[in-house]
Amino acid sequence: MKYWLRNLPAVFLAVLLATGATKSFDPTGRCPGRDLKGIHYAMDFLTQSNKRCAGDPEDASKAILATGKNVIIIGGGDTGADCLGTSHRQKAASVHQFEILPQPPAERAPATPWPMWPLQLRVESSHEEGGVREWALATARFEGDAAGNVKKLHANRVGPAPKFEPIKGTDFVLDADLVLLAMGFTGPVQPGLIQSAGLKLDQRGNIATENYQSSIPGVFAAGDARRGQSLVVWAIAEGRQAAAAANEYLRR
């Protein structure tokens, strides 16, 4: 990988990297029982489902399926909603979605007037299909069976940010056969292409660019890999702008 990225004229005149920002944020790593089987990152679950729907070959022994299981999704954002919808499609026995932040107001909060991104409750089509949404909750620990499979999730209600302090007497336990971690992302995955090519990164760990061109001439980056995790509309816009920058580079 490093060879052909650094020797582009011998292979391609230009390359555009749009690999996304899929390095998962995982504060549950400190929770007892985090290493139990049945606890997975959301992207592993969703990517596998997409490949399955596309008819790609699959190793059944490594399949992550919600079918007939009590599913708990930790994270209340778009990725969590995708997990919720996919779990419905796979006919989960039950689905709970947790968010550590308090429930947003039904209407735009006065603290976020236009054109700011509104603090407001959003209901995706996945939520309309079912499942239980809970706010102001934090995971305390996971409990498993003798075979090392996750079976229970221990949680508690918490106070407001930034401390999210546990509220005394609010502990509870839920059945959990599959736990999906959808708490956000911390940038592009660096081991592999980014590290082997020696691409320079910005202060946030994203691919550093100037007019969408990376530190390697002829190698461009766009979307989440360049700007960090964001909305798909940004990825579309950046793809177009990066293509224009690559075209300018090729016409020199």
Image (tube, rainbow, N blue to C red):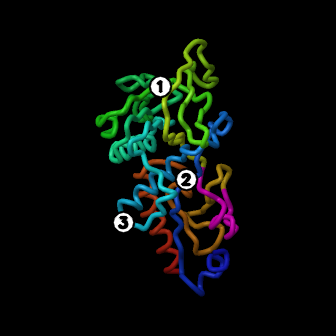
- Checking the image for residue 135, the label placed there is 1
Query: Which of the 4 image quarters holds residue 209?
Result: bottom right
User: Which amino acid type is shown beneath numbered disc 2?
Assistant: Thr
Q: Is residue 29 magenta?
A: no
Residue 113, horizontal then vertical, whole percent = 42, 28
111 and 103: which one is in front? Answer: 103
- Sort mark 3 into few (<14), some (14-19) or many (20+) by Cα contacts within 10 Å: few
Label 1 vs 2, first from the N-terminus: 2
What residue is drawn where x is 67% and y is 79%? 3
Residue lying furthest front in this view? 146
Instruction: Tell me which numbered mark, 3 or 1, is placed earlier along the sequence.
Output: 3
What's the CA distance linking mark 2 and mark 3? 23 Å
Identify the image quadrant of residue 122. Answer: top left
Q: What residue did someone put label 2 on?
A: 22
Residue placed under numbered mark 3 in the picture: 55
Q: Earlier in the sequence, mark 2 or mark 3?
A: 2
* Residue shown at 58% from the left, 47% from the top: 24
Report the quarter where the N terminus lies: bottom right
- Viewer-side residue, 86 vs 233: 86
